[in-house]
Image (cartoon, rainbow, N blue to C red):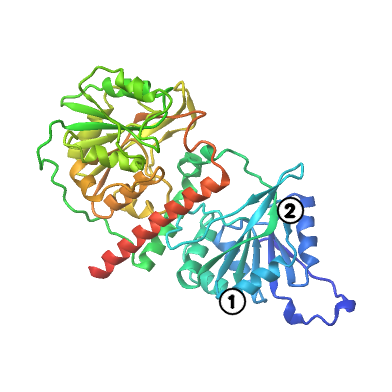
Amino acid sequence: MCTFAVDKPQQPSQHFISIMNKLIDCFVPVGNEEETERNVQALDALDITNDITIVETSMTSTETLQAIASMVKTPYTLLYLKHQFIRTGYLALERMVQIAEATGAGMLYADHYNVSADGLRTEAPVIDYQLGSLRNDFDFGSVLLFRTEAFKEAAGRMKADYQAAGLYDLRLKLAQKHGIEHINEYLYAEVELDTRKTGEKLFDYVDPRNRKSQIEMEAACTEYLKEMGAYLPPTFRDVALTEGTFEVEASIMIPVRNRLRTIRDAIDSALSQQTTFKYNIFVVENGPECHSTDGTTEAVDAYDDPRIIHIIPNRNDIGVGGSWNMAAHHPQCGRFIVQLDSDDVYSGPDTLQKMVDAFYAQQCAMVIGTYMLTDINLNTLPPGKIDHKEWTLENGRNNALRINGLGAPRAFFTPVLRQVNLPNVNYGEDYALGLAISRHYRIGRIYDVLYNCRRWDDNSDGDLSRDKENRNNLYKDRIRTWELKARMGLKQRS
C-alpha cells in the first residue's frame, strides 16, 4: 500500500487537550490534488483526529485493508471511500464515536447530504443494515468509522487476497461478530459522482465488464454463508413434473396496470408463440382501483381469442405478487406458468416452447431464461444481453442471496408455486419466490436470448426517488434476512 501520513502539528495553545482525545486515525483515498488536500486539511483541523494517511492503492483490496489494520494506533479508524471532498458536520465524528461507545458496534455509517456543483444540497438517507444485507453494493455512504479492535480482528480473519471484494469481505466479517450500526442523522456532505438514473444502475452487477469483481464477491459471500451455517450444498429435492391434471401445458402470465401503450405488444407476442402443446394467457389486473384507468382494460377486452383469460379482481388490495397467485390458483392455469411483463415482449415465437422444454430437460421447479435490454422500439441498450452467467448449479442458490435479481423470463412449475405463493407486493415478489424455491429445488437456466426487457419512460423502476429506492432495497434485504434464517434453520435441523 503506497501511503504517506500527514502528522498533526503541535499546537501549544491547546496543550490542555489530552492525547487520549486523539481517538481516530483517518485514511483518505488519493483523488485530484485539490480535493485530497481539502480532505486532509479538514480532518487535520478536528480535535478528535490523530494521523491522516493518504492511500494510493485501492480501498477495496485485501492487502490495503490489512495494511491499514497494521498501522492504526488509535481506538477508532476512519475510512473515506470516495475521492471527492467530504465536509463533516459539526461534532459529527464525536457523535459517531459516542454511538460506537454506546452500542459496541464494530462499524458505523450515517445519513448524509449530497451537494451538487452549484451548491444545491439534498438529503441522502441510507438504510439500516440487516442480517440479510448481503448485496456487495449496499450503500453505506462514503464515511465509515470502525472500532479498531474489531477492524483488526476482522482483517485478521480475511483469508483470500481480493482486489475488489476486500471491503465486502471485511464488512461481512464485522457483521458476523461485531455488528454494524446505522446512524440515521445527517453527519456529513458529499458530492454526487454517479448521476445515472436508478434504472441505469440496475444491471451493473451483470455487466460483463464487472465479471472478475463479481467472482470475488461471490467467493466472499459463500465463505460468509458457510461460517454462518446458511450455505446449501448442491443437493436438491426431486420434482414430479408429470403429477396432476391440467387443461393446458403452460400459461403465460401478464400482470398489468395502466399499460395502454404496451399491453397490445405483450399480448400479441404471447399469442404468436408456436408450441407443440396447448397454452393459455392470463392477463391479471392489479392496483387500488381493481382495474386499469387508462383504457388498458378495454384494450384487453377487445381481443377475441379463447386463450386469453382476463381477470379483474373484485378487491383493491392486489399487487403484482397477488395477481400471480390469482393466476396460479385459477383452475385453468397450466402445468407451468411463464412470465411476460406488460411492457415487454418475447424475442421470438419459440420462447414458450424452449422454457417448457427446459423443465423436462433439467428436471427443475423453476426456469430462468436470458433477456436483451432494449428501448421501446427494440433497439439494444447497454449492457445488452443479460444472461446471469454468475449462476451455477453448484453455487447459484447461495450467490442468489447476494445479487439483486435472478433474471428473466421466469417460469415456475405450478404445483410448487401454489405451495410457496408470492408476497402480495409490487416489488421483489419474484425474487422472494425464486429464493424460496431455490432453498429446496433445482433452478434451470437457458442462456439463449428469449425475452426483450424494454426500458422506456414509464418503467416502474426507471428513475426512483431516493426514498422509494431505499424502501425497495430495505424490503429486498428483509427478504434475504428471512431466507437466510430459513436456511440456517435447515442446517440446524439436518
Residue 129 or 370: which is nearer the viewer? 129
Q: Residues within 10 Å of mark 2 (few under 14, many from 20)?
A: many
Q: Say above or below: 10 vs 64.
A: below
The residue to which callout 2 is attached is 85
Question: 449 or 454: nearer the eye?
Answer: 454
Tell me how far mark 2 sits from mark 1, CA to CA. Answer: 29 Å
- Kindly tell me whether residue 473 is visible in this rendering: yes
Which quadrant would residue 197 be assigned to in this image? top right
Locate the C terminus by quadrant: bottom left
The answer to whether residue 494 is above or below residue 433 is below
- Is residue 402 left or right of 268 when viewed as pictured? right
Q: Is residue 104 above or below residue 487?
A: below
Drawn side of residue 483 relative to residue 404, left or right: left
Residue sitting at 56 percent across and 58 percent down? 61
Residue 313, x across and y down, in percent: 30, 36
Q: Amino acid at mark 2?
A: Phe
Residue drawn at the location 38% of the way across and 62% of the way down: 225
x and y percent of residue 273 in the render? 25, 22
Q: Residue at x 37, y 51 (%)?
A: 400
User: On screen, 379 above or below 201?
Assistant: above
Say which mark, if any, is on residue 102: 1
For the residue labelled by badge 2, is the local secondary structure a helix, a strand or a loop? Answer: loop
Specify few, some or many for label 1: CA neighbours under 10 Å numbering under 14, 14-19, or 20 or more.
few
* Residue at the image position 41 percent from the left and 44 percent from the top: 427
- Count of labels shown? 2
Q: Is residue 149 visible?
A: no
